[in-house]
Amino acid sequence: GGQGGGNPLVYCRHFMDGTCQARSSPCGFKHGLLRLGGMPKAHSNGIDAMLIQENPEDSTKPILWTGSRDGKLKMWEMVEQDGSRLQFREKQDTNMQGCNVTSLLYAGDGVFVGQSNGVITCFRLNGQTFTLTGHTAPVYALLMLDDVLISGSWDATVRFWKFDAASQQFGCVQSVPVCSGVKAIANHTTQLWVATIEKIQVLDLSNNGTIGAGFDVPKVMDLLLYSGPSGSFMLAVTLSGHIKAFNLQTGAEEYDQQHSGPQQKIMKLAGLKDPSDGQDLLLFAKDNGWITALELPTMNERGSFRAHNEVEVRSMVSIPALGLLFTAGMDGSVAAWKFVPGGTPPCKAGGAPAW
């Protein structure tokens, strides 16, 4: 991005950092996205998992958790600085005993950590730690449904866990074998969608996890539930760059389009709302560090930007109502972004606050 020429579907990098001179008239690139801050070396290796947690001590300072292939789990406090920037302060650095962190979930009063050796560790806010053993391969997906923890693993099983008050331990109450390794899971009413390396399988939670209808869509990297004026849809993205939308009322596949170029892969999905016009957005991350925003439900492209320099983005989390997005690269970097009205002067007194 910059002055002269331009591409209206690429976000202006000068607007992102507050140096674009064309504020009263278009510079040729798209305005409306700020880079709030980041950490070039949050970890010494790639980051596969992130989550946002409300700070129990100060609601104005949300907590970011990052899990990496360097075997570290880190907690960061985010503090607003200079009116429209974020500063990250490391509050905790936990060594996961040499195991990569493959998934993260905040539920109840604890952080659940899926690891590359199949173990799930729960760190409760009161200092208690629980270890959930049973999986024999990386745990890539975690979900809490009511009081049941659901985990999906590369060992081709989905496990259901409950906390037993008498023994003060988590126990596995059910293990459901699926066709192949699990990459993502998502829930809609009594359905549990399971993205495996071979296909999408749907478990009926009202019938003891019986595997029902499915879809022959291989190598699905992520799933995202979207509910809008036209209904509820399960969105899926494949490694080859296809984005699909399944109507959850009819079960029909209503959208299938490839959104990546040759040899490119799509790694992750996230959703948020653009504060400039209230538009629901679907964001997808490519393996070259670029992120694209699509408008929902039309899937029209709103814009793209390079979040990380020529590295895979395998983790994104958002605060949808605030238009906030956090991205992490396989070089150990983290960045924070905010969608704003295109005429908002960034990084200046009176500009858009970070929160």
Image: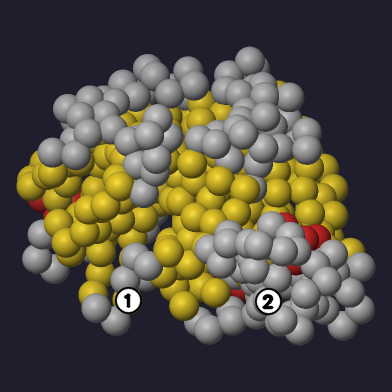
Residues at badges 1 and 2 in contact (C-beta under 8 Å)?
Answer: no
Lower position in the chain sequence, tag 1 or tag 2: 2
Residue 208: mark:
none
- Residue beneath label 1, please? 228
Residue 94 seen in this snapshot: no
Residue 145: give x, y in percent of width and height.
Answer: 36, 55
The answer to which quarter of the image holds residue 73 is top right
Q: Is residue 51 depicted above or below 221 in this figure?
A: below
In what quadrant of the picture does the N terminus appear?
bottom right
Mark pair 1, 2: CA separation: 31 Å
Amino acid at circle 1: Gly
- Residue beneath label 2, please? 26
At a point 50% along the width and 35% down the height, the residue shown is 287
Q: Is residue 218 depicted above or below 190 in this figure?
A: above
Secondary structure, mark 1, is strand
In what quadrant of the picture does the C terminus appear?
bottom right
